[in-house]
Image (cartoon, grey):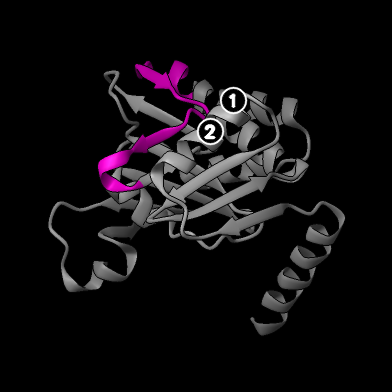
């Protein structure tokens, strides 16, 4: 088991060296400065900005990051169509609440069933970890479910209205094995399709399993 974990770590480090992400982090940034930065950047491709309690992080995602995000989004949208589920995509729209001192641009985000101001589901592809606690940030935005894609697997967190002691470390989210928003979705099969190095073949195979 230790050998497998070590091999995975070494592979991850090698990939990061080949296709690195760049991050700039600073603190003591007020909300007006955050807003000004967003306005200056505008729709400039290649940057993701996250803000929480005065800490600002600017990230330039790697190709591997963008590849994972796009493939997950494509496969999920195939699922929505085949399962006849009404959905409203946000993409990487900036989500922010001044009164909660929080804002971010998720990799993918969706409302399920009805359109809302903030998404029900957010997906984050993790290649290198940042300094901002994304679960705390999404709790303040009342996002019901957060999926992290890291090391070729999904970790799914669902927000609980009541926060028992065991959920405090996850900012009120419970780590679960199956999505509660999409209970019929085979998350393991989805992960296998995301890992497939051939996107077209993966999409065809995924669609076939849904029919």
Whether label 2 touches label 1, CB < 8 Å: yes
Residue in the image at 54% along x and 28% along y? 39
Q: Position of residue 165 (x, y in %)?
A: 19, 73
| Drawn side of residue 20 relative to residue 98, left or right | right
Instruction: Report the number of numbered marks.
Output: 2
Highlighted magenta segment, given as a residue range: 79-101
| Drawn side of residue 126 relative to residue 165, left or right | right
| Placement of 20 over or under 60, stated as above or below | below
Residue in the image at 65% along x and 38% along y? 47
Which numbered circle lies on residue 121?
none
Residue that extends furthest to the bottom in the rendered view of this protein: 2
| Placement of 203 over or under 136, stated as above or below | above
Residue marked by disc 1: 42
Nearest the viewer among 97 and 160 is 97
| Residue 87 counted in the magenta span | yes
* Label 1 CA crowd tier, 10 Å (few <14, some 14–19, many 20+): few
The kind of secondary structure element at disc 1 is: loop
Residue in the image at 70% along x and 44% along y? 60
Residue marked by disc 2: 38
The kind of secondary structure element at disc 2 is: helix
Q: Position of residue 166 (x, y in %)?
A: 24, 72
Q: Position of residue 100 (x, y in %)?
A: 28, 46
């Amino acid at each position: 088991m230790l050998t497998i974990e070590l091999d995975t770590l070494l592979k991850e480090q090698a990939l990061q060296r080949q296709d690195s992400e760049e991050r700039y982090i600073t603190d003591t940034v007020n909300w007006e400065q955050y807003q000004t930065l967003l306005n200056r950047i505008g729709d400039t491709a290649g940057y993701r900005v996250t803000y929480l309690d005065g800490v600002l992080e600017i990230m330039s995602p790697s190709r591997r990051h963008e590849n994972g995000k796009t493939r997950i989004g494509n496969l999920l949208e195939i699922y929505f169509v085949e399962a006849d589920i009404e959905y409203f995509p946000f993409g990487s729209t900036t989500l922010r609440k001044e009164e909660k001192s929080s804002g971010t641009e998720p990799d993918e985000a969706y409302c399920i069933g009805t359109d809302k101001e903030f998404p029900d589901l957010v997906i984050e592809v993790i290649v290198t970890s940042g300094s901002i606690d994304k679960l705390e940030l999404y709790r303040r935005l009342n996002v019901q479910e957060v999926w992290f894609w890291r090391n070729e697997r999904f970790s799914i967190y669902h927000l609980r209205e009541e926060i028992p002691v065991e959920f405090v470390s996850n900012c009120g989210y419970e780590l679960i094995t199956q999505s509660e928003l999409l209970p019929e979705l085979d998350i393991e099969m989805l992960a296998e399709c995301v890992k497939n190095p051939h996107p077209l073949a993966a999409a065809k195979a995924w669609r076939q399993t849904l029919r």
